[in-house]
């Protein structure tokens, strides 16, 4: 309920130097009084002795901040209690808050939801806030900050504004055919709709870069058994994540390692070696290897350098433009440099065991990851939710142009505008009326 005052631990659970508890709602000031605190001036940190409302026992000696509505995160009265981050302190303050009438623990995301409902930001910004909290790499952090700053909101609001304008003009043509309308209004409408459709199509056609930065790139290591795939995974992850052994068929399940590769989130997947096997479990592993490779963003195909230039067909068949080819165990063979620079120019010779060539290979991998995530667009779309809504919008714009009747075209444009409205979380009709009357002064 909107009138409740909510509270929650805003910092992470567990022992820490400081813990932050947050309150939001009309009862925040009363709650502070119940804790024996004097209301501080707005946005100033003051020292406070938090006391139990009933027993008056001291719970902690900490800091208190007061953000009166509407200039607060949620737009409501907000208080922040900075207490010592011990379990007993935090639990006793939370228990004290629960005992105060009109207060209740916040639901997940409820502070942000209230901020959205009070117009502090749109849905894409709320999503970016969640992404920023989840960000584990610099690229995720950068992307979340840009989106939180309104990069997507501005783009989508601008598109929606232009679309609503075109729709208003079309409605005017339909509803008021006798009014004094400029001759070229219809041409203008359809020119603008086509421009919009093109912009949205280009925005969609980004190869999923923003989504990849957010969710992380998936790279799958494939190759014949015993080529050194698990050794390579461990070397890249800098830990013994996968079992390495000279026995072919050791890796049978899919092993995933999440890593930060030069600021990008990468999920590296080690798989069972590709071969014909009579072992049921190994065959299931090989099937999983193929399934994972099929949906990976990129593949690393590893071959055994000891038998170079022999390369197994089962692995060769899976090499495509998104595959980095690696010849491992270069410590065992002297590979003639002309061979390397010749037809094998795109192959990395490494020894995952000794580290030879690993630096150059890691750099090549990073470059590949970068090329799959970097985008010229300042604001790439970052979620499947954005993609779906924009696809709906794009398709409706295309339909509108084909519509036999202006009334049907208007319906398609309305649908397209709603799709954009869903993206940012604002769908209102008042806006449409405003534009009609401002631009045409119809009805006077
Ligand atoms: N000499 C040498 N041996 C390696 C190298 N990489 C892996 N090996 C060995 O090759 C065998 C198979 O390695 P493993 O990583 O389990 O291969 P996988 O089956 O492809 O996962 C193990 O005995 C490793 O120690 C390397 O660069 N040089
Ligand atoms: Mg293995």
Image: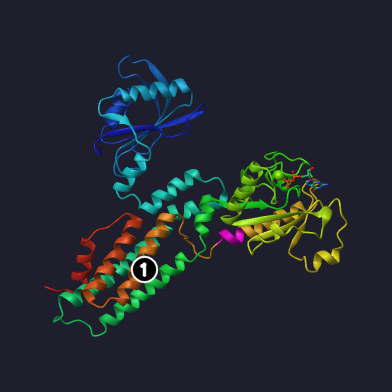
Residue drawn 35% across the image and 40% down it: 111
Dominant secondary structure (helix, strand or loop) of the stretch shown in magenta: helix
Residue corresponding to mark 1:
395
Measured as percent of width and height from the top left, residue 333 is found at 87, 54
Q: Residue furthest bottom?
A: 183
| Callout 1 secondary element | helix
Q: Is residue 19 above or below residue 70?
A: above
* Of the pair 153 and 321, the residue shown nearer to us: 321
What is the crowding at mark 1: few (fewer than 14 residues within 10 Å), some, or many (at least 20)? some
Q: Is residue 169 above or below residue 310?
A: below
Measured as percent of width and height from the top left, residue 389 is found at 37, 60
Residue drawn 41% across the image and 68% down it: 200
Left or right: 336 as drawn, with respect to 422: right
Q: Is residue 381 magenta?
A: no
Measured as percent of width and height from the top left, residue 160 is found at 32, 65
* Of the pair 246 and 109, the residue shown nearer to us: 246
Where is the N terminus found, in terms of image quarters? top left
Q: Which residues are magenta?
A: 370-374
Residue drawn 69% across the image and 59% down it: 324
Q: How many marks?
A: 1
Left or right: 246 as drawn, with respect to 375: right
Q: Is residue 308 above or below residue 82?
A: below
Q: Is residue 75 above or below residue 333?
A: above
Residue 149 visible in this rendered orientation of the protein: no
């Amino acid at each position: 309920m909107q009138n409740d005052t909510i509270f929650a631990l805003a910092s992470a659970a567990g022992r820490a130097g400081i813990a932050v508890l947050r309150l939001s709602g009309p009862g925040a000031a009363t709650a502070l009084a119940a804790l024996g605190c004097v209301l501080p001036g707005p946005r100033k940190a003051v020292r406070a002795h938090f006391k139990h409302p009933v027993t008056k026992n001291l719970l902690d000696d900490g800091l208190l901040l007061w953000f009166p509505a509407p200039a607060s995160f949620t737009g409501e009265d907000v208080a922040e209690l900075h207490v010592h981050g011990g379990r007993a302190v935090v639990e006793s303050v939370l228990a004290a808050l629960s005992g105060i009438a009109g207060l209740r623990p916040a639901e997940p995301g409820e502070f942000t939801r209230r901020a959205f409902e009070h117009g502090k930001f749109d849905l894409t910004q709320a999503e970016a806030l969640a992404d920023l909290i989840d960000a584990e790499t610099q690229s995720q952090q950068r992307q979340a900050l840009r989106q939180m700053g309104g990069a997507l909101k501005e783009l989508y609001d601008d598109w929606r504004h232009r679309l609503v304008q075109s729709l208003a003009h079309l409605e005017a043509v339909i509803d008021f055919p006798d009014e004094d309308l400029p001759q070229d209004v219809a041409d203008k409408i359809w020119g603008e709709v086509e421009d919009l459709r093109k912009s949205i199509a280009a925005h969609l056609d980004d190869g999923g870069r923003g989504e990849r930065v957010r969710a992380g790139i998936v790279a799958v290591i494939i190759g014949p058994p015993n080529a050194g795939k698990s050794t390579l995974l461990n070397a890249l992850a800098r830990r013994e994540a996968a079992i390495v052994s000279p026995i072919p068929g050791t890796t049978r399940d899919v092993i995933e390692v999440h890593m930060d590769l030069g600021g990008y989130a990468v999920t590296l997947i080690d798989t069972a070696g590709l071969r014909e096997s009579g072992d049921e479990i190994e065959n299931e592993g090989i099937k999983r290897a193929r399934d994972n490779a099929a949906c990976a963003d990129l593949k690393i195909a590893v071959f055994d350098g000891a038998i170079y230039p022999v390369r197994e067909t089962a692995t060769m068949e899976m090499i495509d433009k998104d595959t980095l080819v690696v010849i491992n165990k270069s410590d065992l063979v002297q590979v003639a440099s002309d061979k390397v620079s010749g037809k094998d120019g795109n192959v990395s010779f490494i020894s995952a065991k000794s580290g030879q060539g690993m630096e150059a290979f890691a750099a090549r991998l990073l470059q590949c990851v970068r090329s799959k995530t970097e985008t010229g667009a300042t604001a790439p779309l970052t979620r499947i939710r954005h993609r779906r809504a924009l696809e709906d919008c794009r398709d409706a714009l295309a339909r509108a142009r084909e519509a036999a009747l202006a009334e049907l075209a208007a319906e398609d444009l309305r649908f397209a505008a709603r799709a954009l409205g869903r993206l940012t979380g604002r769908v209102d009709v008042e806006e449409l009326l405003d534009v009609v009357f401002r631009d045409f002064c119809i009805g006077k």
